[in-house]
Image (cartoon, rainbow, N blue to C red):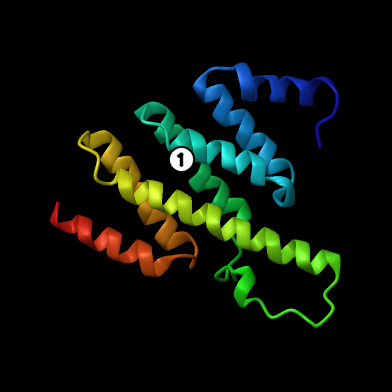
């Protein structure tokens, strides 16, 4: 865990650094605590939705790596509505259920960004998005019903 000047440096980079610095700083902050990473994920998703290709690719690569290596479990995530909770759940259980639901929504947004990116006119960007799509599909079972058809449809391109 980072304290003091290291934390201030990373925080400053995430708001005032270059594109690569901001993406790296947000990734480091998300790695610190998986349970507290949602604000950093939202910032990275916001960066990945921007039209600038270099920013989109950097943020998408960081998000894909974060989800596949750190955040997603080896099972599909359960939405809050379908989670079976006891009649009087503890705060901890409710927080875990909420976190998993938000994580599922964030991963769906990333998957949507990647699937849209596979239709890019610039070949390099399209190939990187296809690589991310393949990594997402082969890495974890989450959203495989959306990702597999998207990847298969690209065989015709």
* Residue 58 vertical position relative to residue 72 in the rendered view, above or below: above
Secondary structure category for the residue under label 1:
helix
Q: Is residue 155 visible?
A: yes
* Residue 21 vertical position relative to residue 126 in the rendered view, above or below: above
- Between 92 and 68, the one lying in front of the other is 92
Residue 149, horizontal then vertical, whole percent: 28, 65
* Residue 92 vertical position relative to residue 68 in the rendered view, above or below: below
User: Left or right: 54 with respect to 25?
Assistant: left
Q: Outermost residue, left direction?
A: 156
- Between 103 and 155, the one lying in front of the other is 103
The residue shown at (82%, 19%) is 5
The residue shown at (62%, 62%) is 101
Q: Is residue 132 visible?
A: no
Residue 25, horizontal then vertical, whole percent: 63, 29
The residue shown at (13%, 57%) is 156
Instruction: Assess disc 1: are there few (<14), some (14-19) or many (≥20) residues with their C-alpha within 10 Å of its C-alpha.
Output: some
Residue 65, horizontal then vertical, whole percent: 52, 46
For label 1, the residue is 61
Residue 4, horizontal then vertical, whole percent: 85, 23
- Please identify the quarter of the rendering in which residue 146 is found: bottom left
- Please identify the quarter of the rendering in which residue 89 is found: bottom right
């Amino acid at each position: 865990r980072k304290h003091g000047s290291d934390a201030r440096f990373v925080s400053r980079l995430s708001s005032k650094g270059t594109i690569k610095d901001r993406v790296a700083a947000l990734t480091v902050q998300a790695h610190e605590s998986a349970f507290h990473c949602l604000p950093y994920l939202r910032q990275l998703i916001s960066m990945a939705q921007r039209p600038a290709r270099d920013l989109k690719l950097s943020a998408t690569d960081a998000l894909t790596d974060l989800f596949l290596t750190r955040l997603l479990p080896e099972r599909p995530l359960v939405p809050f509505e379908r989670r079976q909770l006891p009649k009087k759940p503890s705060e901890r259980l409710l927080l875990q259920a909420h976190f998993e639901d938000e994580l599922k929504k964030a991963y769906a947004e990333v998957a949507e960004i990647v699937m849209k990116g596979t239709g890019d006119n610039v070949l390099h960007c399209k190939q990187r998005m296809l690589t991310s799509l393949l990594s997402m599909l082969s890495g974890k079972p989450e959203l495989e019903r959306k990702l597999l058809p998207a990847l298969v449809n690209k065989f015709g391109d």
